[in-house]
Image (spheres, rainbow, N blue to C red):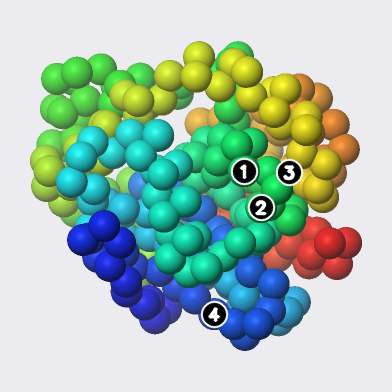
Amino acid sequence: MEKKNMIINGKKLSYIEKGNVNDPPVLLLHGVPESSLLWREMIPCLVSCGFRTIAPDLPGFGQSEPFDESSTWERYEQFISDFTRELKLDKFHLIVHDWGGLIGLKWACDHRERILSLFVSNTTISGDYKWHSLAQIWRTPNVGEKIMKRMSDDSQFQTDMKNSIPNIVDETLEDFYRVFRTPESSKVILDLYRSGNIEKVKSYNQKLNQIKIPVTIIWGENDPYIPFEFAYKLQKEGLPHAQVHIIQNAGHFIQIEVPDKVNFYIQQHFKNV
């Protein structure tokens, strides 16, 4: 899928943009270790629903260059402000997955007047969340660096990802691998996870409660990283008016595993906004 490039703060930023420039915009934020190609099956669906669809490779992921400074949670939030300003996106619909949700939901709480609707999958900012085992390793100094060295083995990465997501296509797989290639590139993930102190969002349930726009939450029933119970927790604690849908026989990467089901819920959501 063809990407465009721009320069933000002196760094190359790659992104996918499809649809009519005058249509209402939708911003899609991927997670770790993903890229804009996570959304390759959703983008045509959104365009056919009448939306301008914009999906960046977050800095350091896919084909985007990393920040000069540490790749922290806060720095990615600043990036959302920079990127949307560059594209002159004032108000937009927001679709998030995984770390894209930790970044995007926190940003949405602080800029709620700019968000037209929210479509959330497999992500949480709940204070009750306990990091999954790989995240705990990444968050541990020295241990994280050692495991990253192992994960830089391209063929091993491909094998592991294909075991996890059998229907992933090679172009997407190669894009996802880019962040692991070198100790410098993989530092992006270590920085991000080590900055991920959930204490920072203790106050955000209150802020989420002030978001009165349409919200859909979808989840893979078998997500090994963030259990589907957190879909209901997000609804109960912060977004009581949200529609929640759990997709059976699907894991964490639902956009690739079951794209037709994700697109069904996207169509439902955008029919009602």
Q: CA distance from mark 2 to mark 3?
A: 19 Å
- Which residue is at 28% across, 67% downward? 7
Q: What residue did someone put label 1 on?
A: 111
Count of residue discs: 4
Q: CA distance from mark 2 to mark 4?
A: 21 Å
- Name the quadrant of the N terminus: bottom left
Q: Secondary structure at mark 3?
A: strand
- Please report whichever mark, 4 or 1, sits nearer to the chain's N-terminal start: 4
Q: CA distance from mark 4 to mark 1?
A: 24 Å
Q: CA distance from mark 3 to mark 1?
A: 20 Å
- Name the quadrant of the C terminus: bottom right
Q: What residue did someone put label 3 on?
A: 217
Q: Is residue 18 left or right of residue 265?
A: left
Q: Amino acid at mark 2?
A: Arg
- Please report whichever mark, 4 or 3, sits nearer to the chain's N-terminal start: 4
Is residue 105 among what the camera can see? Answer: no
Q: Quadrant of residue 143?
A: top left
Q: Secondary structure at mark 4?
A: strand
Categorize mark 4 by other alpha carbons within 10 Å: few (<14), some (14-19), many (20+): some
Q: CA distance from mark 1 to mark 2?
A: 6 Å
- Which residue is at 61% across, 62% downward? 90
Q: Amino acid at mark 1?
A: His
What x and y, as percent, mark residue 270?
79, 64
